[in-house]
Structure formats: C-alpha cells, structure tokens
Image (spheres, rainbow, N blue to C red):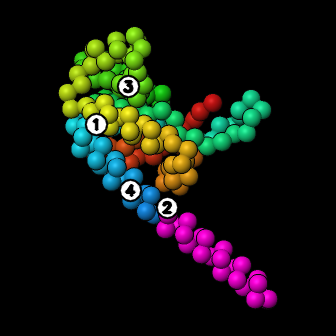
Amino acid sequence: MSNLQAEFDKLLEEQRDLAKRFQSKAQELFKETTKEFFDKNPGITAVMWTQYTPYFNDGDTCEFGVHEPYFTNAKGEDMDDITRWGEYEGNKEGVWSESSWSFTGDSEYSRKQREGMNLTGVDIESIKKFDTLIQSGDMEDVMKAMFGDHVRVTATRDGFDVDDCDHD
C-alpha cells in the first residue's frame, strides 16, 4: 500500500473518531438540556415528538425530520390516552396535551387553547427554545443517532422512551 493510501486511511479513521466524539458530546448536552427544560417546567410531565423519513414525498427527496413536539401534564394511565398525534383523548378534567404552536402562537385558536389550560409551572420561553432545538436542521443527525428513524419519542424527567411509529 502506498504512503498516500495509508495517509488517506488515517484521515478517514480520524473523521470517524471525530464523528463519534461529536455524537457523544451532543447526546450528553441534549440530556442536560432536557433536564434543564423539566426543571423550568414543573407543570409539564412529558414532551413527545415523532421523527422519521417519509416513505413518499410527492416526487421530492424523502428526508429525515423531527416533527413538532407536544407537551403534556398527563400522568400515569392518562399518558395512554394521548394519541400518536399528541392529542389527549381521555376525559380527566384538567389534563392537556398541546403542540408548541398552541403555547407560542398568536392566533385566536392558540389563545383560546391556552385559556382553558392550567399553565402553572409552564415556562413558554423554554417551550419555544426546546421546540426550535429539536426541529433544527443542525440537530437532525444528532436526533436520528440518539433515537432512530420512524419513532415516537417521549421525554420525561426519568429519561426517554422510544417506540416505533407508523406514519404517512
């Protein structure tokens, strides 16, 4: 093997090592960010989102993406009443599950959604930041490496639960 081939192989190995270190550090930071989010939001028990590569995109390239998160105050069995789209279908008074848009939007619909919710212990600014972070194009590789493709992720104070999801 020539010296050039050996140098190229070494460079490729360095690139793989750098990618591993990046992923490890990014995952560590994401876990810290999630912990900080829950510390600022004692009124939120879980954040859920789906992330996947579409099977079909009307002729366009199918690209992996993280979709809008839903935030909830549901606990225990009430978590089972949240659909894969983040909607609470139970009938327990005071339980909600809403998209980040419901918390942050300025539309009439968003304002009406917030009116009926007990937002004690909910920090709207941190919801905006969390939403922006996980849907950032810069985070896509990190999110995919951490949780996978075609999954629904539920983040709680205790960690992350990842389930396969159907979509499209």
Q: Which mark is residue 29?
A: 4
- Secondary structure type for disc 3: helix
Q: Are dots 2 and 1 in contact, CB under 8 Å?
A: no
Q: Position of residue 110 (x, y in %)?
A: 39, 16
Q: Which mark is residue 45?
A: 1
According to the image, label 3 marks what residue?
Answer: 104
User: Is 37 left or right of 66, judged from the image as shown?
Assistant: left
- Using the rendered image of the protein, determine whether residue 66 is visible from the camera's viewpoint: yes
- Secondary structure type for disc 1: loop
Looking at the rendering, the stretch of residues picked out in magenta corresponds to: 1-22
* Residue located 65% across and 77% down the image: 11
* Residue located 52% across and 35% down the image: 67
According to the image, label 2 marks what residue?
Answer: 23
Question: Which numbered disc, 1 or 4, marks the residue closer to the eye?
Answer: 4
Q: Nearer the viewer, residue 76 or 71?
A: 71
Q: Position of residue 71 (x, y in %)?
A: 36, 32
The answer to which quarter of the image holds residue 81 is top left
* Residue located 73% across and 39% down the image: 61
Q: CA distance from mark 3 to mark 1?
A: 18 Å
The answer to which quarter of the image holds residue 52 is top right
Q: Tag 2 or tag 4, which sits nearer the N-term?
A: 2
Q: Nearer the viewer, residue 103 or 4?
A: 4
Q: Tag 1 or tag 2, which sits nearer the N-term?
A: 2
User: Is 151 left or right of 100, judged from the image as shown?
Assistant: right
Q: Nearer the viewer, residue 72 or 6?
A: 6
Q: Label 3 sits on what residue type?
A: Thr
